[in-house]
Image (cartoon, rainbow, N blue to C red):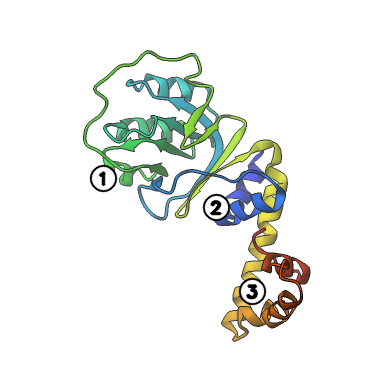
Amino acid sequence: MNNVSIDRLEQLSTPHLADACLRTGVTVRCAPAALRPVIPTMRCAGRVRPARHFGSVDVFLEALEAAERGDVLVVDNGGRVDEACVGDLITLEVSTAGLAGIVIWGLHRDTPELREIGLPVFSLGSLATGPQRLDKRTPDALASAHVGKWLVGPEDVVVCDADGVIFLPCARLAEIIQAAEIIRLTERRQAGEMREGRSFRDQAAFAQYLARRLQDPAFNFRDHLRMIGAAIEE
C-alpha cells in the first residue's frame, strides 16, 4: 500500500468499495451499522493499527510506538457499552502521532473535546465512565483486533465515512480500487442523465429486461445490467 492508493481511497465512498468487493469476489467486511462517526462528515482511510483494550490506555501508547503516519488505530474493546475506552487525551496523542483516525469497537467519551480535536473517530457511542477494571493482557494485544465478527490487522486497510466502516485486504487493494472507480463513474454518468430527464428505467432498458424475463424467468436484473454495461453492484 502506498500514498497513491490512500489518495484514491479517499475519493471513494464505502458503498463504492463494498460494491467493488462484490464485483471482485472479495468478502465484504463492513463493521456493524452501530459504529458511527463522532461528527457525520468525518472520514478516513489507512492501514489498520490494531490494539486490544484490557482496561488501561498503555496498550494504545504501545501501538503508537509501532505505528506509521497515516495508519488508523483500531481499538477492540469487545463491543462493550458499559465503559468508554478512548477519550480526548488518547485522541490527541493519536492525532499528534500522525495517524489518520480511530475506530473503536466500543465507546468513547469527552465528545465535545473530540469534536474540537477533529481527528476522525468512529465508535458505538459515548459514555461518561471509563474502565473500572484491569484485565490480564493477552499476547495478541497488538497483533489483531475484532470489530463485530471480523478479525483485522496490519494486513488490512480500513475506510470510514458517513455510511460506516469497511475493511479491505491490502493484497487485493489495487483491484478493489479500480473496480470502485469504475462503479463511481458509472453511477455519476447515470445520475447526470437522470438530472437531464432520462430516467434510470430508460437507461437500464427496463422494458427490455421485463420482456426477457418473461421468456427466461431465471434471468435477473443484475445479469441484464451487466449485459448492457450498466452494472453497479454485483
Q: Position of residue 157 (x, y in %)?
A: 58, 38
Amino acid type at circle 2 is Thr
Q: Secondary structure at mark 2?
A: helix
Residue under numbered circle 3: 190
Q: Earlier in the sequence, mark 1 or mark 3?
A: 1
Count all numbered tags in the image, as a single digit. Answer: 3
Assess whether mark 1 and mark 2 are in contact (beta carbons under 8 angstroms): no
Q: Residue at 57% across / 51% down in the picture?
A: 10
Mark 1 belongs to which amino acid? Pro
Tell me the CA gap for discs 1 and 3: 40 Å
- Which corner quadrant holds the N terminus? top right
Q: Position of residue 146 (x, y in %)?
A: 48, 31
Q: Residue under circle 2?
A: 14
The three-letter code of the residue at mark 3 reads Gln
Q: Earlier in the sequence, mark 3 or mark 2?
A: 2
Residue 117's spot in the image, x, y percent?
34, 42
Task: Tell which circle, 2 or 1, labels the residue nearer the N-terminal end.
Answer: 2
The crowding category of the residue bearing disc 1, from other C-alpha atoms within 10 Å (few below 14, some 14 to 19, many at least 20), is few
Q: Give the residue drawn at x 52%, y 30%.
A: 49
Front-most of residues 8 and 220: 220
- Residue under label 1, please give it: 112
